[in-house]
């Protein structure tokens, strides 16, 4: 079964199309990275999949259900979306409290917090190596630490589909690897499907099952990393030369300028 199906999707603002005739199928328990230069439509596509933007034409299906037929409550239980820019939380809110907010869809109308809610928060904080930060206030954290907490809140919902827009921004190289490793583990543990907008071509190649390469609102190529991370394709899209190497059968590229 496909977790996400995008069929003939076209979207734009006013009369200017940004996405044209987009078709994508994402299988359950896959990590799919969307790459491409700035302005290629990556974020817009992700927002259409998340149900934030309504396509001009075409449709999006999540786990076999048409997005338009789903209530916002049902969608929020299945899909978790983390945008590039996150509204800063109240400065005195602790890391634990902020991550707990991600469980609101499971908390009863009386706003009681269950043992399962507490357990879920501590599990995800430990996975992201944030357990020692639980009692810290959000204003005490660095930009990179806050980004990890935002990711933790998106994950604590235990969604079936996780949509991340450039989640590695502000993270140092160690924390980038932690996040990507945790995502890979959760794909198996929670039967999670992940779609990530990324700028780092090599990270995308190392951790993705499939890569979607975009340019000017269209899909140039999609498939396994070794079929998409090809110098000729990348040169066409990015306008610079690349040298291809392999690290344990994983394609990696070096820009040549």
Image (tube, grey):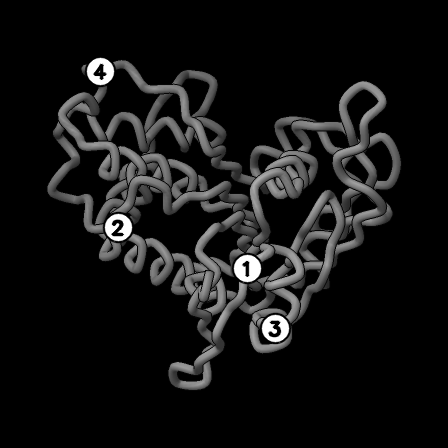
Label 3 sits on a secondary structure element that is loop
Residue that badge 3 annotates: 224
Mark in the foreground, 2 or 1: 1
Marks 4/3 in contact by CB < 8 Å: the verdict is: no
Q: Earlier in the sequence, mark 2 or mark 1?
A: 2
Q: Earlier in the sequence, mark 1 or mark 3?
A: 3
Marks 2/3 in contact by CB < 8 Å: the verdict is: no
| Residue 36 in picture, x, y percent from top left | 59, 51
Q: Does residue 180 sit above or below 13 in this rendering?
A: below
10 Å crowding of disc 3: few (<14), some (14-19), many (20+) = some
Residue that badge 4 annotates: 91
Q: Earlier in the sequence, mark 1 or mark 4?
A: 4
Label 1 sits on a secondary structure element that is loop
| Residue 88 in picture, x, y percent from top left | 33, 19
10 Å crowding of disc 1: few (<14), some (14-19), many (20+) = few
Cα–Cα span, label 1 and label 4: 43 Å
Mark in the foreground, 1 or 3: 1
Disc number placed over residue 240 in the picture, else none? 1
């Amino acid at each position: 079964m496909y977790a996400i199906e995008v069929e003939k999707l076209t979207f734009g603002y006013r009369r200017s199309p940004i996405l044209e005739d987009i078709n994508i199928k994402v299988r359950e328990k896959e990590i799919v990275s969307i790459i491409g230069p700035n302005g290629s439509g990556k974020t817009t596509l992700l927002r259409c999949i998340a149900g934030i933007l309504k396509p001009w034409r075409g449709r999006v299906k999540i786990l076999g259900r048409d997005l338009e037929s789903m209530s916002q409550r049902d969608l929020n239980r299945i899909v978790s979306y983390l945008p590039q820019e996150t509204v800063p939380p109240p400065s005195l809110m602790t890391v634990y409290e902020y991550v707990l907010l991600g469980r609101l869809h499971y908390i009863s109308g009386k706003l009681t917090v269950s043992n399962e809610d507490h357990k879920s928060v501590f599990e995800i904080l430990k996975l992201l190596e944030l357990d020692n930060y639980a009692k810290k206030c959000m204003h005490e954290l660095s930009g990179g630490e806050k980004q990890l907490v935002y990711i933790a809140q998106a994950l604590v919902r235990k969604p079936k589909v996780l949509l991340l827009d450039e989640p590695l921004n502000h993270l140092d190289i160690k924390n980038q690897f932690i996040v990507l490793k945790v995502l890979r583990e959760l794909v198996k543990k929670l039967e999670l499907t992940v779609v990530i907008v990324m700028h780092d071509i090599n990270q995308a190649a190392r951790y993705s099952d499939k890569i979607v390469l975009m340019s000017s609102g269209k899909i140039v190529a999609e498939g396994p990393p070794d079929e998409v991370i090809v110098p000729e394709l990348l040169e066409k899209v990015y306008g610079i030369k690349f040298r291809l190497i392999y690290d344990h059968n994983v394609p990696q590229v070096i820009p040549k300028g």
